[in-house]
Structure formats: structure tokens, C-alpha cells
Amino acid sequence: MELLLIFMLLFMILAGIVALWTDELLSAVIAVGAVGVGTSVAFLLLGAPDLAITQIVVEVVALVLLIKVTIGVGVRTMSGMPSPKRLRLAAAVTVLLLLVMVRSFTGLPEFGSPVMERVDDAPSIVYLEEGLERTGSANQVMSVLLDFRAYDTLGEATVIFTAVFGALVLLRKKGKKDREDDDGGEDEE
Amino acid sequence: MVYVLCAMLLCVGIFGLISQKNVIKIIISISIMENAVNLFLVVIGYRRDGIAPIITERIHESVQFAEKAVDPLPQAMVLTSIVIGLGVMALMVTMALRIYHVYGTYDITEILKSRKKAE
């Protein structure tokens, strides 16, 4: 199980590097799709089938969006590689961050022993033990999402609505000002 | 080992975010980072040989469910985060489209140049 997970992660890292390396934008989009599908398989290995399903759906929609923005407008290759100065800066920052992260992992429990076992009266244990009686839901992820923490889901819906609203405003063909100008032009005629 | 690999995936995303000049590549980097963080949160809640936190009749009768299932809380939060990620991605893609319509390129250095010229 752990070996499979490590294999999936290595595959995802490889796909991520390919996505950044290639000049062809279509290849980059497909490589990032591979990262997403790898995440989905990893979720399945980690006992999270709900997440795997959601991830697949999200990945398909994201792929369509990204293809619309590359092939849809006729851009196939990207112009010019990043300058060496920028690459050096990025490498330095990345290595520094990686070192900090690896150091901070010593404070975490070993892989395979969840945090909820270390804390007394962890909310997760309560959800697992009492979820069925209190919410009537067999799937405890959904009982947390829609019952115990329903306000978070409401907030999520708000965020999505805002994002879609912003996207619609940006995609509008004509701004309000242009339209008023057009009306003015018609009056003069 | 799994934690370090998750961190490496995140670092691939951060490297792209800093080094790339193309707007599409930047969106792709952010998407990779998102995947890495979501995966890391689920990995923290994993129990060795754990089962999915779904009660079936067989499990309900035979074993102690709370001692076998993986942590449902990070999974619920990550589910929220994945869907929000899609919303943010849609917003970023429309912004990129808008940039392309205005400047005719996805290259941020060229966009900066033409902005300076306009001033």
C-alpha cells in the first residue's frame, strides 16, 4: 500500500516536472491532467473514495477550461524560456522551502498513525463514533460535510458563487460604459 | 518518506510559480500545488490498513468502526478545498483569456513591456 502510494507520488512529481518543462502548451495541460488523475488514485489508496470521484470530475472540467484557453485561442507553443537569473532565484527559494518543510515533518506523527489518535476527545473520533446515531448518514465524510460542519459547506458555496460571478463579469463581451456610449451614439443619429 | 514526496510535489509547483513567464504555466503550477496540499492533508489523516469511513452493514456488526476507519475530518475539508480549487481555476482561466484579448500574448514580461510603452 505504502509502496503503491510512493509510486503514485513519484509519477505525479515526474508529470509536474514535464508540465513545467515542455514548450508545447497542450502537452503541459495534459501533464497537469496526469497529476490530477494521480491524486485521484492516491485518494483511492488512502481510503477516500468520495475525494477520488470529486477529483476526477474536477480534473475533467479543469482540462476543458485549460484547453479552451490554449488551443481555443490558437496558442500552441509558449515563447521563450525563463531567464537563467530567474531560474536560479526559483531554485534557491524552492530548495530553502523544501529544507524547512522536511525539518518541520519531524514534529508530525509517523505515516499511518492519524493525528486524531494523539489528541484526547478529538472531534474526528466523536464524528466516527456518534455520526451514525446523530446524523443517520452511513458515509461519515458526508455527515461531517453536511451536518457537523454545514456552515463550512455554505461558505464553500459562497466562494464558488463569487468565483463564477467574477468569471462571468470578466467574460462579458461589452462593459457597461461601452454600452452607454453605444446608446448615446444611436441617439445622435 | 510520503510526507517528503508530498513536499517535493509542492516544491515543483512553487518552482514553476516563480520561474515561469507564461500565464498558462503559472495557472498549471498553482494547480499542481493545490493537488500536493490536498494530498498531504489526506495523508495526515490516514491510518495504517484503514478502511474508508463508510459504515456498511458488515462493518457495523463485526468490528469497532472508530478504531478501523481513517480520519473523516480532513477528507471533508479537502472535498471543500477541491471544489473551491475548481472555482478559483475557472476565475484564473477567464482572467488569462482577458489578458490575451487585451495584450495578445500570455508572456508576462512582454505584457510589462507593452504596459511601460503605453505609459
Image (cartoon, grey):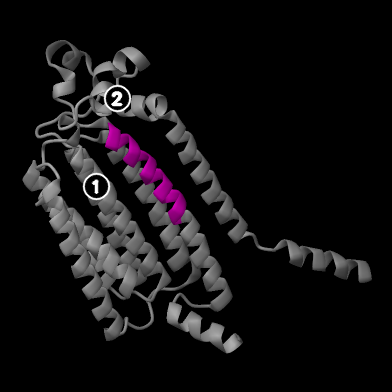
Q: Which stretch did the figure color magenta?
A: B73-89
Q: Position of residue A19 (x, y in %)?
A: 28, 66
Q: Position of residue A124 (x, y in %)?
A: 25, 28
Give the chain letter at badge 2. A
For the residues tagged 1 and 2, is the chain the same?
no
Which corner quadrant holds the C terminus of chain A? bottom right
User: Along the horizontal axis of the image, is B51 left or right of B92?
Assistant: left
* Relative height, residue A159 to residue A181 (above, below): above
User: Along the horizontal axis of the image, is A130 left or right of A165?
Assistant: left
Look at mark 2 in the image and give the residue it sits on: A140
Please say if the residues under marks 1 and 2 sit with CB atoms less than 8 Å apart: no
* Relative height, residue B49 to residue A137 (above, below): below
Q: Is residue A68 in the magenta section? A: no
Q: Which mark is residue B39?
A: 1
Q: Which sits in the foreground, B77 or A171?
A: B77
Q: Residue at x 14, y 25 (%)?
A: B68
* Relative height, residue A38 to residue A187 (above, below): above
Q: Residue at x 34, y 57 (%)?
A: B31
Q: Position of residue B111 (x, y in %)?
A: 50, 80
| Residue neighbourhood size for the residue with mark 2, other residues' Cα within 10 Å, grouped as few (<14), some (14–19), many (≥20) | many
